[in-house]
Amino acid sequence: MGARVTGADGKVVGTVELVFNDDVDGTPAWARVRSGKAGRFVPLRGSRVTPDGLAVPFDSQKIISGPEIAADRHMSAAQAEQLSRYYGLIVPAQGGPDSDTAAGTDKAGSDKAGSDKAGSDKAGGDKAGRTGTDMAAGTRTDTAAGTGSGMGGPADTDWLIRSEERVDLGKEMRESGRVRLHKYVDVEPVEQAVHVYHEEYEIERTPITPADHVSSEIGEGQQEIILHEEQVFMRKEAVPVERVRLVTRRVAEDRTVRDEIRKERIELEDQDAGIRAGAQRPS
């Protein structure tokens, strides 16, 4: 369990989740491989254990494109047959009722020949014996001809399995980059006009008349006044003006992926000139 599975093309398919044994002999027959979120089955026939895990004789794409089988503890016979057909482990049978009929005809001919031979011996006549022999030979000849006409035989079990790669597209989320917000402190000059006031002195002279009744003695004297002015001072405080943060949004786009797939092709080659080709059967 947990072994890494590598296909015949050298690509890693996934890891082994479960192993299913054969119901007849109990030997390991199938392995369920976890590939991404999906589970696929691969036959263990022809596989080998390597230092890297398990190597199977099938391409990774063929394994990934395999049928989805819902089997957790036991695999039914129908499921095993479906997988075997997909991987080409089951060769389509070409026999059937016609083959059984041919075989039955051959047996009937032999039995009939035996009956004719027994009848000829009992009668003691060479003519009857020859008749029975000819009938048996004719029956076997017709049966052999019927078998050779393509109704099923050993030669019909030799098949070439043609396979091709299929494309299965999947998506996964990956990290594409990082964006960071950083706050800096910039210093810039500021200038603002302010109205201010200041005091200035003036000499004010007013004549004195006899009606003012002001008396004074001659001597020195002085007067002092205080002048004022407004001074400008600056006080600074931090005031929030804006909130900034990073958010993500999903943007849909169409993206084209390109690759190459392999397809097997079957052609006839090195055909003898004296052999005539028969009609092809529809697939």
Image (cartoon, helix red, strand yellow):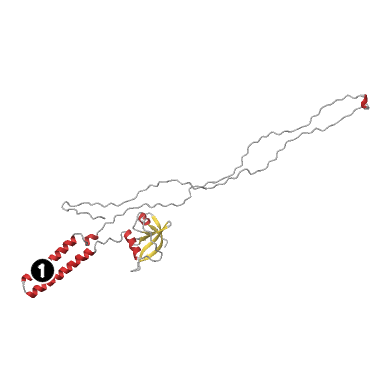
Residue 215 placement, left or right of 46: right
Q: Quadrant of the C terminus?
A: bottom left
Return the x and y of residue 280 as percentages of the image width and height: 22, 54
Residue 101 placement, left or right of 24: left
Please say whether residue 105 is visible from this viewpoint.
yes
Three-letter residue code for mark 1: Thr
Residue 101 placement, left or right of 77: left
Q: Quadrant of the N terminus?
A: bottom left
Q: Which residue is mark 1?
A: 133
* Location of residue 204 (image quadrant): top right
Please say whether residue 48 is visible from this viewpoint.
no
Name the residue rendered at 17%, 62% in the picture.
146
Relative height, residue 29 to residue 278 (above, below): below
Return the x and y of residue 134 as percentages of the image width and height: 10, 67
Farthest bottom residue? 122
Relative to the observer, which residue lies in front, 156 or 189? 156
* Location of residue 156 (image quadrant): bottom left
Relative height, residue 29 to residue 199 (above, below): below
Name the residue rendered at 7%, 71% in the picture.
128
Return the x and y of residue 56 as percentages of the image width and height: 35, 59
